[in-house]
Image (cartoon, rainbow, N blue to C red):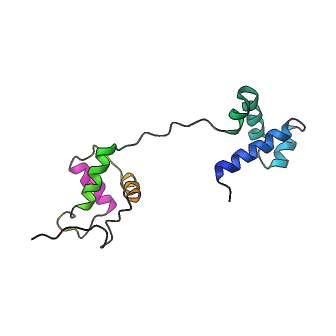
Amino acid sequence: MLTPFAFRVISRIRCLNRSRAFGIRKVAAHVGLTPKTVWLTSQRYQQGGLERALYERARPGKAALLDGPQRQRLVALVCSPPPPGRARWTVRLLAEEAVKRKLVPRVGRETVRVLLESHDLKPWREKNVVRGRAG
């Protein structure tokens, strides 16, 4: 199965191969793209060559909210016992506690969820974190 990236590149190749012989609308109908996509691909080819036409430029994306030490502190918080009165950590509780304990200036529950997922941590399960026994 093709990845979306590979599918886009192949569609653009097919588009460029036919755009010289036929009009933009005929190429778009034959290849299965919109006329605007065919036109933009041909413009990128004329301005920057084949490489520019087939591949997109790198996008900057949004900067990470947490740096390395902040992520480590959050993971350490997950591995610690939950606050009194709680049986286990929840994602919301982790986000609130991290800000309350000043581990991070601000953090959302989705950021915490993604961090936990990347470390394969599930603190809401009973058998997730191995803790040493006291005494």
- Quarter of the picture holding the C terminus: bottom left
Q: Does residue 45 appear to the left or right of 89 in the view shown?
A: right
Q: Vertically, is 86 above or below 106?
A: below
**For residue 20, which quarter of the picture?**
top right
Residue extending farthest left: 135
Q: Vertically, is 50 above or below 1?
A: above
Characterize the magenta stretch by its predominant secondary structure: helix
Which residue shows up at 34% across the image and 42% down it?
Answer: 67
Range shown magenta: 88-103
> Does residue 93 show up magenta in the picture?
yes
Q: x, y percentage for residue 68?
A: 33, 44
Which residue shows up at 30% across the image and 54% down it?
Answer: 95
> Does residue 97 show up magenta in the picture?
yes
Q: Does residue 134 appear to the left or right of 58 in the view shown?
A: left
Which residue shows up at 23% across the image and 70% down it?
Answer: 87
Most foreground residue, 87 or 133: 133
Q: x, y percentage for residue 4?
A: 65, 51
Q: x, y percentage for residue 69?
A: 29, 45
Which residue shows up at 74% across the image and 47% down it?
Answer: 10
- Quarter of the picture holding the N terminus: bottom right
**For residue 76, which quarter of the picture?**
bottom left
Residue extending farthest bottom: 126
Residue extending farthest right: 21
Q: x, y percentage for residue 92?
A: 32, 59
